Image: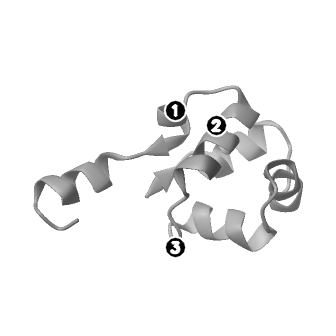
Amino acid sequence: MKTRIPELRKQQKLSQEELALAVSVTRQTISSLESGKYIASLGLAFKIARYFGLHIEEVFDFSELEDANHDGNL
């Protein structure tokens, strides 16, 4: 899943560790989200979006998941 987390972090001059502490996860979780190795739970996605003052769709690109669902892959 694509995400704007790295871009948003850099705009606010936040490290992965600082964001992780703010949303109560590990730095490894933030790193995995940024690299696309991990898909955020709905709760975490909302926490991150709320932290940046954005809507969830402004932070996370769900189009890949929607495409897979329409193809019968989910």
Q: Looking at the image, which is closer to me, 74 or 10?
A: 74
Q: What residue does disc 2 label?
A: 49
Q: Residues within 10 Å of mark 1 (few under 14, many from 20)?
A: few
How many numbered badges does the structure rendering display? 3
- In the rendered image, residue 29, in percent from the top left (x then y), is placed at 69, 68
Give the side of residue 37 with respect to residue 9, left or right.
left
Farthest residue, direction left: 71
Between disc 2 and disc 3, the foreground one is: 2
Find the distance from the CA under tag 2 to the CA under tag 1: 8 Å
CB atoms at circles 1 and 3 under 8 Å apart? no
Coordinates of residue 19 in the picture (x, y in percent): 82, 51
Q: Which residue is mark 3?
A: 37
Q: Quadrant of the C terminus?
A: bottom left
**Image location of residue 18, percent across then percent down:** 89, 54
Q: At x 53% / y 69%, what residue is drawn?
A: 38
Q: Name the amino acid type tagged 1.
A: Glu
Q: Residue at x 79, y 68 (%)?
A: 27
Quadrant housing residue 51: top right
Please tell me whether mark 2 or mark 1 is closer to you in this view.
Answer: 2
Circle 1 sits on which residue?
58
In the rendered structure, which amino acid carries the disc numbered 2?
Ala
- Give the mark nearest the N terminus, 2 or 1: 2
The numbered dot on residue 8 is none
Marks 1/3: CA–CA distance = 19 Å
